[in-house]
Image: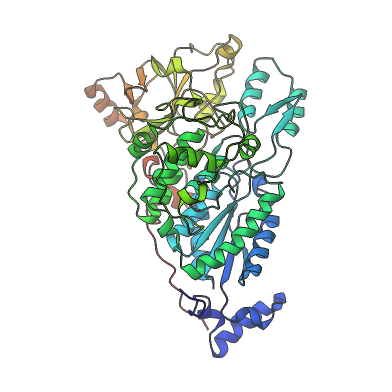
Amino acid sequence: MTHDHVRRSQAWFGAAGRSGMIYRSWMRNQGFGPEVFDGRPVIGIASTWSELAPCNAHLNRVAEAVKRGVWQAGGFPLEFPVMATGETLIRPTAMFYRNLLALQAEELIRANPLDGVVLLSGCDKTTPGLLMGAASVDLPAVMVTGGPMLSGKFRGQDVGSGTHVWKFEEDLKAGRMTQAEVFEAEGCMARSNGHCMTMGTASTMACVAEALGMQLPGSATWPAVDMRRFEVAQEAGRRIVAMVDEDLRPSAIMTRAAFENAIRANAAIGGSTNAIIHLMAIAGRLGVELSLDDFDELARPVPTVVDLMPSGRFLMEDFCYAGGLPVVLRDLAEAGLLDGDALTVTGRSIGANVATAQCWNREVIRPMSEPLQPAGSGTAVLRGNLAPGGAVVKQSAASPGLLRHTGRAVVFDTPEAYHEVCDDPDLDIAADDVIVVRGAGPRGYPGMPEVANVPIPTRLLRAGVTDMVRICDGRMSGTGYGTVVLHVAPESAVGGPLAFVRTGDSVTLDVAARTLTLDVDDDELSRRREAWKPPSPSHESGYGWLYTQHVLQADRGADFDFLVGSRGDGVPRESH
């Protein structure tokens, strides 16, 4: 594509007669002169800025940096809001709204006079939601994530957002901290703009976006308040204008090779299990074949080399200053574990992007020969009569002694049912029991919340128990830890086998064998299935009804069935 090509935006701004007058004149009430309608690329800046999404509350300033870059490169930038799904406040869970964000972003990009788009995200679901929407329109797009918070500091020690929430909760329950100390710690944990600075889902998805080739090299890790975050945003503004000229679209970047790179990068950084669901959903928009088993097979030869909470010791600032994701990608490439030819938003291959990356701290980014966790200890995909559609467990966050375990099931129909009794000193539960929490899947909750790593019962915590096997059809925060089996599919609400487990049943977890087994014979399971009645619908109308009617299971990315695939950038019919 050349500069004199008639751009998509000219169907609006280059129109003759009354229509053109309407499109141009109403834009001019913002003070734009007539020269901006001369055929230059019109660049949308899709921003998930919101004060209700604390991790994204600085994105309005990031947008200003993007605009500078667009103007510098001869484009015309126009910022617009898309739904912010902040994990920290929104109920029932941000995942409930990820698909709505993706739908809104897709329709706004397609419906407006845009030639390319810069995607501004931060908190967990905003990154995959925007990538899903952009993939379905397939206009040139580049992602700019908002960056992590500065490292938390509490009484001389580094504390990690999310990860230390679970630790402080346990310390409070066990009597090791007072409520006043917890209040003090809260302010020390979140001390700047930005998303979680642990390797939670927000940091994971920022790195995944970079590994997919959709974010500029090195930009996943700059802290939110570091001026280099704004420099890279300005660079993204310049780059998207060139991408429009090159007609470089997401479908050319997010190929099967890119997804394989992202899966291996996720294993190397000790990334969140949530990346599995989000990558499955993004791949579904692009028609890229990706299965749950790919995550196990592709990750098996990859060691965890980044020493970050919750699996390790350090935080995102340390990872950034050590060299960031480009070092990890270069190390993977040198080990033959990265497809270096995969194209990126730079217009160059990912191998070329990271060829000169240097590590400045091998304590934070370990050498492949001296990893934090050996190859094969990443996220494992389990199957068996309890999870015929698959389930996952993050081995690096689990207790090694529990990765092969048989125990008595103690079953709760909802997360709330467990929380009602977990503090009861007379609760009939032992350390070697298996806590089963159901009713937390995509349809059942609805929205598949991050509740699977329910706290250890208070009585056992006070007795010194630090971990138990927990099984759930929900998710776990990327900042969480423990021996927790997640994403059990099919979920209980649709009649998956999890619905038929009873307290007292024996359950066997064998991660090495990749199995999750309910030790009940097939005839008994059939009887329980026949007697089972589905739960009453959670919603009779509204978005909740739409969600529960159309959400896919976890092993397919929990997208809506009617949003799978790409619908292109076709210009809507004019209305004037």
Q: Quick check: 515 above or below 401? A: below
- Left or right: 193 in relation to 431: right
Q: Which residue is nearer to you in this view: 110 or 463?
A: 110
Provide residue 545's location: percent of width, then percent of height: 45, 50
Q: Quick check: 402 above or below 206? A: above
Q: Which residue is nearer to you in this view: 526 or 393?
A: 393
Q: Quick check: 330 above or below 408? A: below
Provide residue 86's location: percent of width, then percent of height: 61, 45
> In the current view of this chain or complex, which residue is farthest to the left?
523
At 50% from the left and 32% from the top, the residue drawn is 270
Q: Quadrant of residue 300?
A: top left
Q: Which residue is nearer to you in this view: 398 or 469?
A: 398
> In the current view of this chain or complex, which residue is farthest to the front?
356
Provide residue 215's location: percent of width, then percent of height: 54, 52
Task: Inspect this view and state whether residue 551 appears.
Answer: no
- Left or right: 143 in relation to 61: left
- Left or right: 524 in relation to 195: left
At 55% from the left and 17% from the top, the residue drawn is 457
Q: Quadrant of residue 240?
A: bottom right
Task: Inspect this view and state whether residue 214 appears.
Answer: yes
At 35% from the left and 22% from the top, the residue drawn is 512
Q: Quadrant of the N terminus?
A: bottom left
- Left or right: 164 in relation to 514: right
Q: What scheme was used to colour the molecule?
A: rainbow
Provide residue 488's location: percent of width, then percent of height: 39, 33
At 38% from the left and 46% from the top, the residue drawn is 552
Q: Quick check: 360 above or below 75? A: above
Q: Which residue is nearer to you in this view: 517 or 240?
A: 240
